Amino acid sequence: MTSSTPRRIRKAVFPVAGLGTRFLPATKTVPKEMLPIVDRPLIQYAVDEAIAAGCDTLVFVTNRYKHAVADYFDKAYELEQKLEKAGKQQQLDLIRNVLPEGVRAVFVTQAEALGLGHAVLCAKPVVGDEPFAVLLPDDLIWSRGEGALKQMADHAHATGSSAVAVQDVPRAQTASYGIVATEAFDGQAGRIHQIVEKPRPEVAPSTLAVVGRYVLSPRIFDLLETTPRGAGGEIQLTDAIAALLDEQRVDAFRFRGTRFDCGTHIGLIEATIRFALDNETLSDAAQHLMRSALDEMGVVES
Ligand code: UTP
């Protein structure tokens, strides 16, 4: 390996210190990232995706109320003992394997919810001077083949660029996303030359929306340190990426897979339905339930 060969990402940052107001009252005590899709919390899906992409250090940016996330990745001695005594090996494996061997979890606190950019900056002491991933667990990405982050990590490694996951959205929805303008796509990726946070449809430079997966150069930390508070009084990751564009190549990457916006009620419901339909043991029952619910409610197929 020459010194100019880009390093593979090993560290993944999970900013989970947001307030989760869209899921109140549930999120009064349960962090949004602990809401389950079938039998696993959202955070577990994101963690599995990061590990499949080659990450062995998981950095959770939490706040002082979010003990549930740390507890989830901690050893549950009492529960393990009980399951062991009862001979419930399958369930024992399930709780022991939330993190495979060789993968470590590190927790850092974001004292105040000053925005996603600020949350990412809180991970700087652990990440240091190497490229790293950021995953927002409420964007759940389902794919049959390689996970979205693995696809992006391979691209970033091959090109030496940073990468931001994107998907096409209807123009009417641009105000809900960061939107990028790019050079022509070569395969799945195109170099970004502009990124704007939540533009109104009439001024959006494209309909390519940023979703919650990033592979970033460590230079982003220096830029975040000088990023002023932007939209909503928060330090925006988008603003720091906009500054990074002037210095380094950042690619928009259209991943293969389906993304569910589990930060919204309907997105969480959609993911639950899709995962249930894809689950061997649940699929038949789930289809039956859905049909009879539609039937009972007098909803006719169009
Ligand atoms: P969201 O915009 O989804 O905000 O943050 P939120 O607070 O979690 O949810 P709502 O909108 O109030 O319902 C995007 C991601 O950034 C993290 C969140 O935890 C989420 O993963 N975040 C946001 C932080 O870690 N810290 C912040 O200060 C803000």
Image (spheres, grey):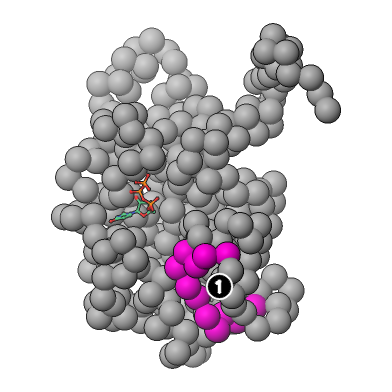
Which one is in front, 293 or 161? Answer: 293
Q: What residue is shown at x 44% (from left), y 90% (from top)?
A: 247
Tell me, yes or no, if residue 47 can be seen here.
Answer: no
Give the image location of residue 286, x and y in percent: 67, 19
Q: What residue is shown at x 43% (from left), y 79% (from top)?
A: 242
- Give the SS element for disc 1: loop
**Amino acid type, residue under disc 1 in the picture:** Val
Give the image location of residue 143, x and y in percent: 66, 48
Q: Going by the picture, which residue comes out furthest to the right? A: 302
Q: What residue is shown at x 58% (from left), y 69% (from top)?
A: 202
Which one is in front, 134 or 54? Answer: 134
Tell me, yes or no, if residue 135 can be seen here.
Answer: yes
Q: Is mark 1 within 8 Å of ligand 1?
A: no
Magenta highlight on residue 197: yes
Magenta highlight on residue 292: no
Q: Residues within 10 Å of mark 1 (few under 14, many from 20)?
A: few
Left or right of 19 on screen, residue 259: right
> Disc 1 marks which residue?
203
Q: Quadrant of residue 114?
A: bottom left
Left or right of 174 on screen, residue 120: left
Q: Magenta stretch?
A: 190-201
